[in-house]
Image (cartoon, rainbow, N blue to C red):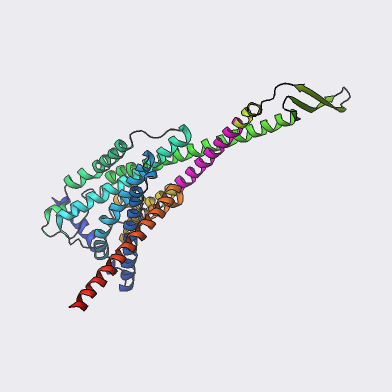
Amino acid sequence: MNSNNSTAEDFSLIGQNTGLEMQFSEGIVILVIVLTSCLISLTVLGNTFVILAFIVDKRLRNQSDFVLLNMAICDFLIGAFPSPVYVPYFLTGKWMSGRFLCKLWMTIDYTVCTASSFNIVLISYDRYLSVTKAVSMQSHLGVIASVWIFSFLLYGPAILSWKNDVIDSNSSVTTCVPGFYDIWYFKFGTSCVEFAFPLISISFFNLSIYCSIKKRGRKKRQKSMLQNSKGKENDGNLHIISTNSVLFSAQLHVTENLGTEKRLTVSLRHCFPYRKPSSFTHNEATLQHRNISQVKLSRDEKIARSLSILVGAFVICWAPYTFLSSIRAACSGFGVKSYWYEITIWILYMNSAINPILYPLCHKNYRKACSLVVKKIKEFVMNKSVTISYWRSESHKIVVSE
């Protein structure tokens, strides 16, 4: 009984100390409101733009792009519900929306953020297969559904069923925290699954991609050097005299016992039916194969660069929250200022606003799709303005006639 009372007191202290209006001046609070509003707007509009690009442009409907679409949906949901609901709680330190909305908010927040984390793993794995195995991940929709189910099971049952002395025992809820808020071993375990496992996975996939590209580039350089050396050893000139006569001249390098080198020029003339198309078939095929290999290597290098940018943004945004929340749970809330913990949550949310900016920069087809969406929006706005002008003119005519 005493332990339950102490837990309730701990949660009450948490609720009293988290409000920014109790720690900072009014000017800082207004600045925070402006910044969070801009962040939420950027998250919602940016990811809506990505979803529209997927709908408008059919080129983005291949299997790999479904993972990016799912990522955009996760980020859109973060900006549409958890972030706006969290703003007043973040500013005042008091939950004023009731018990049901508290449970709903926590469930959606934890589930969607976890799904966003595992989507980075899916994107990395898909690019890993494309670069190292030259194949694509099978059954994308099934894997995406599994990510959502697993993300809910990781936190959802614990949020809904874990005994929470603050929320479940009070009629007026002023603090909205999960029952496992200060259970360090649960927080540590879920942090390992939510952040450490994705970090290890994407590090392995990116390192494998980097090594594969380096290995192929090295082989290509060695092959090119070998072909150049063979070309020098067999240096000769082919002259077409007529349609049935070819003159071949070559220089032979002969080394005598004393080390002196002599050059002998040998000219051969051979008459045979000359067929132009078949003479260069092998060379053309070799050149074409070399060009294809070069294009694929260049494409894979771009994939690696774009993936490293996405992964870098994920690590920078997620690491502060993961480490600080684990330390906070282990220390029972002591030793860490409340506002630092709140700031790391917003840094985590920031990842959802950054991702839609990175997609067009990293993906050529998304750049084209975004241009197409802008064009469609302009056409829609122009049509609307024309329609409004038309109805205004018609209404003006009616008024004048009356």
Relative vertical location of residue 153 with respect to residue 2 in this rendering, above or below: above
Q: How many marks?
A: 0
Q: Nearer the viewer, residue 329 or 134?
A: 134
Relative vertical location of residue 40 with respect to residue 237 in this rendering, above or below: below
Q: Is residue 286 magenta?
A: yes
Q: Position of residue 76 (x, y in %)?
A: 30, 53
Q: Position of residue 154 (x, y in %)?
A: 26, 42
Residue 341 appears in the picture as rendered: no
Residue 110 appears in the picture as rendered: yes
Q: Residue at x 67, y 34 (%)?
A: 225
Prevalent SS, magenta region: helix
Direction from residue 92 to residue 344 in the image, left or right: right
Extreme-left residue of the structure: 171
Relative vertical location of residue 32 with respect to residue 47 in this rendering, above or below: below
Q: Position of residue 400 (x, y in %)?
A: 21, 78
Q: Nearer the viewer, residue 245 or 29?
A: 245
Q: Nearer the viewer, residue 270 or 142?
A: 270
Q: Quadrant of the C terminus?
A: bottom left
Q: Quadrant of residue 20?
A: bottom left
Q: Quadrant of residue 158?
A: top left
Q: Is residue 373 magenta?
A: no
Q: Residue at x 79, y 23 (%)?
A: 269
The part of the chain drawn in magenta is 285-308
Q: Residue at x 16, y 45 (%)?
A: 161
Direction from residue 270 to residue 9 in the image, left or right: left
Q: Position of residue 296 (x, y in %)?
A: 52, 38
